[in-house]
Image: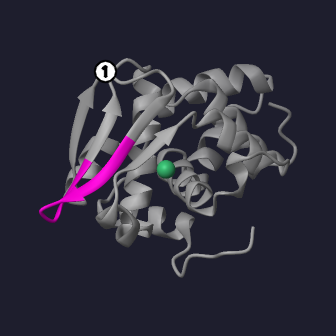
Amino acid sequence: MSARASTNPSQAALDILQRNNIKTAPVPVDKIARTLGALVRFSPLHNDISGMIYIKDNVPIIGVNALHHPNRQRFTIAHECGHLVLHRPMITTQVHVDKEFPSVVIRQLNRDSRSALGTDDVEIQANRFAAELLMPRAFLETELRKTFDVDDSTRIEKLAKQFRVSKEAMGNRLSALFSSFSG
Ligand SMILES: [Zn+2]
């Protein structure tokens, strides 16, 4: 990864949580999208498409695949908010469509392997933003201190429910943050 945004994706997400005084999970991602001025629209899309974002008449429009699981929809909204915060010029000139994520990109991102999608810095940044927004490190640290006595897969399941994200997203997040995590 060579290109770097001037804004750190994780820090941008933390700033938004702080500004909205959000201190517990699940993070209200719809509300966050609204405070960023975005309209969120749910409609049935092809299964490969998670969502999209574009700006029309200065209003950011986030499209979400209504056929996907609600937790995945939440990640999509968070990801699109990341584009809005980090990549506004890009979505002003074109409709940005997200396909086949989050699993592929996140897995690539955290395990440091290579894939076609992984070369896309813009997507990596939006996913970093989304992961921090929905699963803030500080929130997870607090929760992990409470649940030290259970095995990793039980923890992933419990935290995924609590944070309203997929088990896969939570597992990836935990193993990226905490090297001891085997999830
Ligand atoms: Zn994207």
Give me the residue at 40% from left, 66% from top.
90
Residue sitting farthest toward the front: 94
Colour convention of the picture = one colour
Give me the residue at 63% from left, 62% from top.
121
Q: Is residue 61 left or right of residue 16?
A: left
Asked whether 62 or 32 is in front, the reply is 62
Q: Position of residue 23 (x, y in %)?
A: 41, 52
Q: Which residues are magenta?
A: 52-61
* Vertical placement of residue 177 versus 70, above or below: below
Secondary structure beneath dot 1 equals loop
Q: Position of residue 17 (x, y in %)?
A: 39, 59
Q: Is residue 94 visible?
A: yes
Pointer 1 residue: 44
Dividing the picture into quadrants, the one containing residue 166 is top right
* Vertical placement of residue 63 versus 183, above or below: below
Q: Is residue 173 left or right of residue 61?
A: right
Asked if the stretch drawn in magenta spans residue 54, the answer is yes
Is most of the magenta stretch helix, strand or loop?
Answer: strand
User: Which quadrant: the C terminus?
Assistant: top right
Q: Position of residue 79 (x, y in %)?
A: 46, 48
Q: Is residue 50 left or right of residue 60?
A: right
The type of residue carrying mark 1 is Pro
Q: Is residue 27 visible?
A: no
Q: Position of residue 82 (x, y in %)?
A: 44, 58
